[in-house]
Image (tube, grey):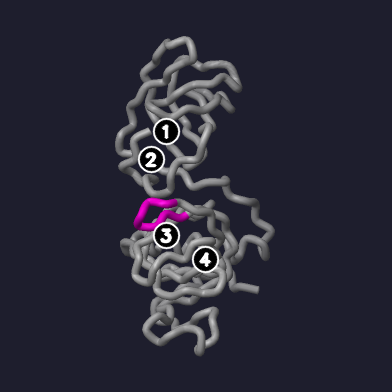
Amino acid sequence: MFPAGPMFNSAARHDSFPPERAPARDRCRHQRVKVSVMGRYMLSNRQEFPCQSIDMSPGGMTVAAPVRGAIGERVICYLDGLGRVEGTITRHIEAGFAMALAMSVNKRDKLADQLTWLANRARLGLPEDRRHERIEPRKRTNTLRLADGREYQIRIIDVSLSGIAINTDYKPPLNELVTVGNTRGRVIRHFDNGIAIEFSRLLSPGRFDESIEI
């Protein structure tokens, strides 16, 4: 049972692993919480694999992963509901690896809030979040192309690994296959000023940030 208030303190010295399994140089500077979240990760050779978080703090996390990578190797990871994080592998465990996270102070604070939310959600009976985090890309204008070749200029509202919401005056029928920029998908929802599209394939977590071009 977790407290409802803030739980991540930079002065805390706690790790979910026993001391004999966590070298002193790799002990977390933040309190970790057990978080089981599915995702994908990309190693430095750009190979991607599925993963699942075991525990996590704003400073590091442990993941179950089929390929462990090398100690010191850079990893980019996308976790459902938490978004994109990156860092370096600090040690191996039997089922995967632990990694130290590298991020700005603002992003670290946001992650602390997200982890607090996850830790308290079950206890408070709160609803599930959307399946994937959404971001607002820097490049907002793009083209909607229909199967018959017609094109419409659109403006991107937000995008996730699995889909996109756009402002457009033309609204194709639900389930129609369309292409936004270079990314194919199908129309799954209409709203007042546009449509929502589910991508045919998830985007790569390695390119999922505000600089993304659809």
Residue at the extreme bottom of the image, as rendered: 20
In primary-sequence order, the first of circles 1 and 4 is: 4
In the rendered structure, the answer to whether residue 68 lies left or right of residue 213 reads: right
Residue pictured at 43% horizontal, 48% vertical: 205
Give the residue pinned by disc 3: 110
Q: Main secondary structure of the magenta part?
A: loop
Mark 1 vs 2: CB contact within 8 A: yes
State which quarter of the image contains the N terminus: bottom right
- Give the Cα separation between the discs numbered 2 and 4: 27 Å
Is residue 38 rendered to the left or right of residue 74? Answer: right
Front-lying residue, 89 or 191: 89
Q: Residue 158: horizontal and vertical position, in percent?
A: 43, 37
**Spot occupied by residue 131 in the image (x, y as percentages of width and height):** 57, 46
Q: For mark 3, give the secondary structure.
A: helix
Q: Contact, CB < 8 Å: mark 2 with mark 4?
A: no
- Going from N to C along the chain, the mark reached first, 3 or 1, is 3
The amino acid beneath tag 1 is Ile
Give the quadrant of residue 2: bottom right
Residue denoted by label 1? 157
30, 85: nearer the viewer = 85
Distance CA(mark 1)–CA(mark 2): 7 Å
Which residues lie in the magenta part?
41-47
Could you tell which of marks 2 and 3 lies nearer the N-terminus?
Answer: 3
| Mark pair 1, 4: CA separation | 32 Å
State the residue position of label 2: 136
**Label 4, on which residue?**
63
Tell whether position 46 is magenta. yes
Q: State which quarter of the image contains the C terminus.
A: top left
Quick check: is 137 in the magenta stretch? no
Q: In the rendering, at what x and y percent does residue 144 appear?
A: 42, 20
Task: Mark 4 or mark 3: name the one nearer the start of the chain.
Answer: 4
